[in-house]
Amino acid sequence: VYGNFNWYQIVADIGNKPWMNSTDRIITTPRHYAYVKISEGCNMPCSYCIKPVLNGPLKSEPIETIVDECRTLAGMGVKELQIVSQNTTDYGRDIYHKPQIAELIDRISDIEGIKWIRLHYAYPTNFPKDLIDVIATKENVCKYIDMAIQHCNEDMLRIMRRPMSKDRLVALLDELKSHNISIRTTVMTGHPGETEEMYQELKDFITQRRFDRLGVFPYSHESRSYSGKHYEDSIPETVKRERALELMAIQREIYNESNLNNIGKRMKIIIDGKNSAGCYVGRPENSTPMADPKIIITSDKTLIPGEFCEAVVTNSLGKDMEGTI
């Protein structure tokens, strides 16, 4: 097991190989998309999280370095970039003294060959509003943002050490939706201090907001986190998981209703490959690889991974959809 920064130890242990002397990026995903890490570490004090302990404070890569990497990936045939870090929207604050994520995405969007750019792991507090303009106006920046809210109850957010009022959170979500930006979020159940009333508020919030994409995690008590040191893990595991399962059941119904409303609609999709049944798997603009809903396609025509097509939705499969080219 190696830590995040044990590069030299890894090289020493497996023995120097010819390819290790290359500085070229090696693609471990399907060839048509790649992950681009723009920073390491995080400065946020969330109670449950040990990422700052494991990865240290925010350390951003310079814009020019990232743009060069993205240009290299485009030259290798990559068409879709997944922009990632522990806190994407805080990018650049350490080296430019202000968030520069909007400038970075604007620069990347000018690279020839990059058809989709997708942002993951945004943080709602101090969300840079100029990023909304870039997402809304740049044709190859996906109308999609992955931004964990974790909760909506103000007392719970305070306990979680996430300084965000419910009114400001709702205003940000409304602004994103007003620009037709799909929102993927995650929430947490069973954090120390979460009462039944707080959970019901979260449940109602999810039911009413109808997030485009949603993940739910039961709280895990980490000894090195703020929670582990200052809070008692008092909520039974069964309660944490029951709450999480109930929220996911609500979200599955939201997926199904949304998919039924999409029947007959045309969508631009990217082909990721085939599933075990031999059917093609495609994704619309508001779906990231692996986690989000897919479109399952039966086609006599050979479809190539990375190919963009227009699909018509024909059926709902619950979370996923069926469609034809």
Image (spheres, grey):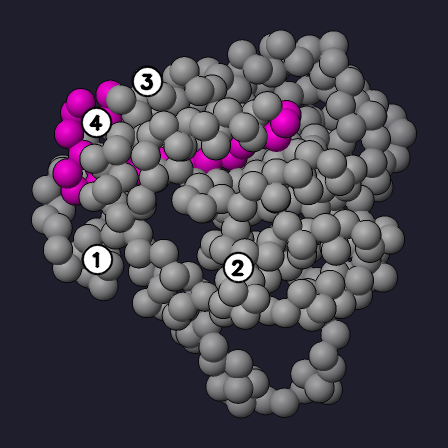
Q: Which residue is mark 4?
A: 198
**Residues at discs 1 and 4 in contact (Cβ within 8 Å):** no
Q: Amino acid at mark 2?
A: Lys
SS for callout 3: helix
Q: Is residue 318 above or below residue 239?
A: above
Within 10 Å of the Cα at label 2, are there few (<14), some (14-19), or many (20+) other Cα atoms? few
Q: Residue furthest right?
A: 301
Using the rendered image of the protein, determine whether residue 105 is visible from the camera's viewpoint: yes
Percent from the top left, x then y, of residue 315?
Answer: 66, 13
Upstream in sequence: badge 2 or badge 4: 2
Kind of residue at badge 3: Asp
Q: Secondary structure at mark 2?
A: loop
State the separation of the CA atoms marked 1 and 4: 21 Å
Per the image, the residue denoted by label 3 is 204
Distance between the Cα atoms at labels 3 and 1?
28 Å
Q: In the image, which residues are magenta?
A: 179-200
Q: Tell me where residue 15 sits by quadrant.
A: bottom right
- The residue tagged 1 is 226
How far is the residue under mark 2 from the one under mark 4?
Answer: 34 Å
Q: Residue at x 74, y 13 (%)?
A: 265
For residue 65, side relative to residue 305 (left or right): left
* Residue marked by disc 2: 98
How packed is label 4: few (under 14 Cα within 10 Å), some, or many (20 or more)?
some
Crowding at mark 3 (Cα within 10 Å: few <14, some 14-19, many 20+): few
> Sequence order check: which comes first, mark 1 or mark 2?
2
Closer to us: 273 or 89: 89
Nearer-N-terminus badge (1/4): 4
Q: Nearer the viewer, mark 1 or mark 2?
A: 2
